[in-house]
Amino acid sequence: MHAMLSTAVGGPETLEWTELPVPAPKTGEVRIAVAAAGVNFPDTLIIRDLYQMKPPRPFAPGGEVAGVIEALGDGVTGLAVGDRVLAMTGFGGFATHICAQASACVPIPNDMPFETAACFLFTYGTSHYALKDRGYLAAGETLLILGAAGGVGAAAIELGKAAGARVIAAVSSEDKAAFCRDLGADDTLIYPRSMDRAAQKALSAEIKRIVGPEGVDVAYDAVGGDYAEPVIRSMAWGGRFLVVGFPAGIPAIPLNLTLLKSCQIVGVFWGASIYRDPAGHMTNVNELLDLYAKGAIAPRISARFPMQAAAEALTMVAERKAMGKIVLTTGDTA
């Protein structure tokens, strides 16, 4: 087997395509022949030791994969050799083979391509948990998404529309705005790539112009930095501001704004929620698969790379050039 290994702290250029022995699954594990792996922003952080999880080196990044089970460890039930599955692995997915906990595997429909499956659960799982379980998004409410053209943002657009919300997509370019409109966003706005105080005021004013006097019911912030405060200034009474990610940095928020708006700042840590509430997680997974079957959601894959080109894919994500999802493949994506 081969894997893209992180052998030293650093950026995508430090990864090395390495030959390794094929692993044997331990008790409770299955070995998956990987067909495709999704590329996500945390993959750019974990190789720099900037993520919550810091696996010992050498390791391969890659937190979600899809493929075929080819071996079972002791004690595994409910899965069989030959099953088509997706799996949330945390890391290790940028490889031709991986051993994953059986509990982390989800059987996929026969008509779901591996590329789609590898780009499905991380983004839709995060956004469904955020909007449903943390934001309590309801039909008729207004949803504003910062970073709406990225993987989780694009998923939030589709899920927001499926929930019956009015969706406003905030992005950094017209190309990204067009992408979001194609996904179903009702309105779009373009914010500058850097923020000073004047730009913050302008962004808040533009949000209020689009939303109207009632304000934003649910804000989904996958950007952070100086972009967060203008959105909170635009919140509705009793609004929910969802903290999803910080590619622009961790914001400093004047908490008097939450008092004036009687709004909430709500953390979204989907990865931890899976382990704290596995039953709730599986309910959400089944709901997402139902939405996929109905055609309400489907990953928009904007770029495909062979596994050996993982560094190029990670650079696109790190530089915020990706729209929708990027996927790595090993050759078999049927």
Image: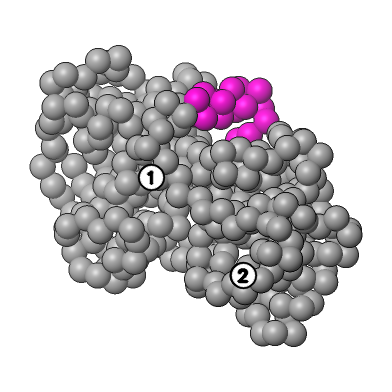
Q: Which residues are magenta?
A: 283-302
Q: Nearer the viewer, residue 225 or 106?
A: 225
In the picture shown, does residue 250 fall above or below 168? below
Residue 163 horizontal/vertical position (percent):
71, 34
**Label drawn at residue 255:** 2
**As drawn, is 59 to the left or to the right of 235?**
left
Residue 227 in view of the camera: no
Residue 289 horizontal/vertical position (percent):
54, 25
Mark 2 or 1, which is nearer the eye? 2
Residue 325 horizontal/vertical position (percent):
53, 49
The secondary element bearing badge 1 is classed as helix
Using the numbered discs, state the Cα–Cα distance from disc 2 to disc 1 in whole angstroms. 26 Å
Q: Earlier in the sequence, mark 2 or mark 1?
A: 2
The secondary element bearing badge 2 is classed as loop
Rendered residue at 30%/28% (across/down): 103
Q: Is residue 334 magenta?
A: no
Image-quadrant location for residue 220: bottom right
Q: Is residue 292 magenta?
A: yes
Image-quadrant location for residue 31: top left
